[in-house]
Amino acid sequence: MIRFLLSLLIIYPSFLWAQDAEIFKPDSIRRTIEARQISTSLRLDGHLSEAEWQSSTASPSFTQIEPFQGKKPTQHTEVKALYNRQYLYFAIFSRDSLGKKALRATDFKRDFNSRQHDFAGLVFDGFNDKRNAMALITNPYGVQRDLLSFDDLFYDIDWDGLWRVRTSRSDSGWVAEIAIPWSTLRYPKTTSTVQDWGFNVFRSRRLTNEQSSLSPYPRSFSAMRMEYAGILKNLQPPPPKPNIRVQPYLLASYDHYRNFDPSIKPKDTNYKLGGELKWAINPNAVLDLTANTDFAQADADRQVNNVTRFSVFFPERRQFFLENASLFGAGVGPNDDLSGGNMRVQPFFSRRIGLDDSGNPIPIDFGGRFVYRSLKRNYGALLMRQRGVGDTPATHFFVGRFSENFGKQNRIGGLFTLKNRPDGTNMTSTIDGFFRLSESHSLNTMLVHSTTTSTRQQGFAGFAQYFYTTNQYKIWWTQSIVTKDFNPELGFVSRTDVIGTTPGIFFYNRGKWLPFKKLIRAFEPGLMTELYHQASTGKLIERQININPIWLNFQSGGFFGYLINPTFQRLTEPFQPLGVEIGLGDYHYVRHQIYIGTDQSKILNFNADYNWGSYFDGKLNSLDAKLQFAPLPHLSITGRFNRNHFDKVGENQTTTNVDLYSVEGRFALNPRLQLIGFYQKNSENTSQNYNIRLSWEYQPLSYIYVVFNHRGFDTLSHLKRTEDHVIAKISYLNQF
């Protein structure tokens, strides 16, 4: 198999160079949209009946990005821009020859999955630095998705901006009418009365999996790559002024515990008052303050059954920490397409604040964050106080960040974290850099030192990650090291005492020689190598050669892939995946894996990951399958089944099944009023968890929540413990 793949590595380039979709440089003549000033206010209804829209000029024609880069789109898109003293308005008419019958949307979730929806989006670069981008995206039903991007590399995906949108659907396509308060946007204070901003508009027609944009960019990048952006001309925004957003909340909760420690009240009722304040001091600087912080509205974590030697990484879900996460989020980790390697090193991980190791909340008394961003430099600081609870004393956290931009798209920076408790202090000091060597070449580096005063231990971690990305292939090499005593108590690391070497390559092949062109869009084989040596001894402790001879992307958006993974593991300490005890020693085994997925935008869609083969000294078959039924955007039900079948594995030659079931439903009257719930059952510890959440956005970013959460599991003494929580919360946002 390895010889076969190597032969493919030699043969494929001859096909790849013949393809028409090379990486191109930004056009010297930029596409433009001219905004027109009006003196009236528009009624936002998605119908564009006002005379102001009728007399405004439409945008130039779009260019296709996917699947045929540079070609004319099959469906026409028109964009218009107006503004007054309060708002910047946009009208996007996404024409469609099949009308509203062609539209795809599976739910009303804010920050929806872009693979499941038609959508259109606006991207702004108000400072014209070609690095920072703000994206506002909507689907045909007015569901919002927004994010901040830096260098098209770091993203604040869960940032929520204050803006409004209404849509309409007809036999001609769909229309989005958008109103953006000037205070939501970021732009400089200048002596000139007229400003031109970097700007782009992009659209995805999910039925044919086609993407297009006002200003073209290579398909291996995204619309947030602002050096390829066009221009939004003739803007006369009001001078940016300090604006303040205040969001107080009132919360009532009822807690019921059964078979817990006697120190925990079996029943308890609480009331909380708190809130947050956001002060945009100037276009570059923002101060956030929070008191008696609460995250009852945050989506609950799902259980994961992990059979690898890597720690599970749960993403941050709390809004306060999600904003400006890209500034503080220096580190390395696997990308969404699995490139880069599995090793993850982050000197700062916000889930270390206000959550215990099991994900249970710990009260936060107060905190603040200051962020400054400009063309030349970025810096920020985060200070939080966590309340003392039980045996955990009050804890103070501090994070400081600085980075300097230089050259076209390069930066170098530092990050410092501090966690202080009465019994000691943990600190990390970081130096990092990112270098955009060309449109295709990039290098990301970091060095981290940790020290703990209570144990006097010091440790070190570092990495260098190189990427070469074109429309034909992606090549990477990640070199990392984490010493045995590295301990970032305010960060995250997959494993310690390890040297990781993870090179790899993906081919993106769309040659005309591909069979079944109406079915298959791309053939993308690859090779991902994972080598890990023990840092303290230099001995090889893990080797995976992930050979991916087949990966097919279908025209519909579905996929099929096959991998074979020859693996070597040297266990220097006992390993217990899902309670199965595996002893010390050297193990050689081979695993096989199949990925399959249908078009995720269809009413009924399915994807699965099935892997099988030998596993240490036995066998393991694993299935992770998900089925979604979404007959209309107002209703979405998803079922998921995960099974790990161990066959004569470990010291006890264990044969067992460990199953994890889950069901999730989302019922929405509209994008602002939704009922969401999920249920999970895990056979490993007979745990049963469910969460039901009613959310009403009664005005933009002001919410009423009612949350019910249940958790039950068996202890080691086979005692059934349960906890139930009922929470009602109302928040009110006022921006002035």
Image (spheres, rainbow, N blue to C red):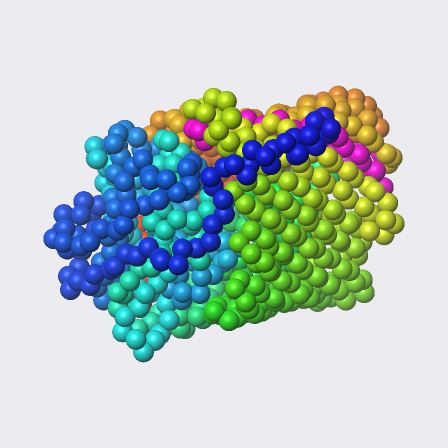
The answer to whether 649 is drawn above or below residue 570 in the figure is above
Q: Is residue 374 above or below residue 634?
A: below
The residue positioned farthest toward the bottom in the image shown: 191
- Is residue 303 in sight in this rendering? no
Stretch in magenta: 554-583
Residue 492, position in %: x, y?
66, 53
Q: Which residue lies most toward the left here?
A: 51
Q: Quadrant of residue 517?
A: top left
Q: How many marks?
A: 0
Question: Residue drawn 39% across and 59% down?
Answer: 28
Location of residue 736 with respect to 216 vertically, above or below: below
Whether residue 218 is visible here, answered yes or no, is yes
> From the viewer's perspective, is 219 left or right of 162?
right
Residue 118 x %, y %: 35, 38
Please provide percent x and percent y for residue 568: 80, 34
Residue 232, above or below 220: below
Seen from the viewer's position, the closer of residues 24 and 673 is 24
| Quarter of the figure that contains the N terminus | top right
Residue in front for this viewpoint, 661 or 162: 162
Q: Residue at x 66, y 34 (%)?
A: 10
- Which quadrant is home to the C terminus? bottom left
- Residue appearing at x 39%, y 48% in the figure: 216
Q: Is residue 563 magenta?
A: yes
- Seen from the viewer's position, the closer of residues 31 and 298 is 31
Q: Is 7 left or right of 42, judged from the image as shown?
A: right
Which residue is painted at 24% across and 56% down in the image?
81
What is the x, y in percent for residue 31?
Answer: 33, 55
* 690 within the magenta span: no
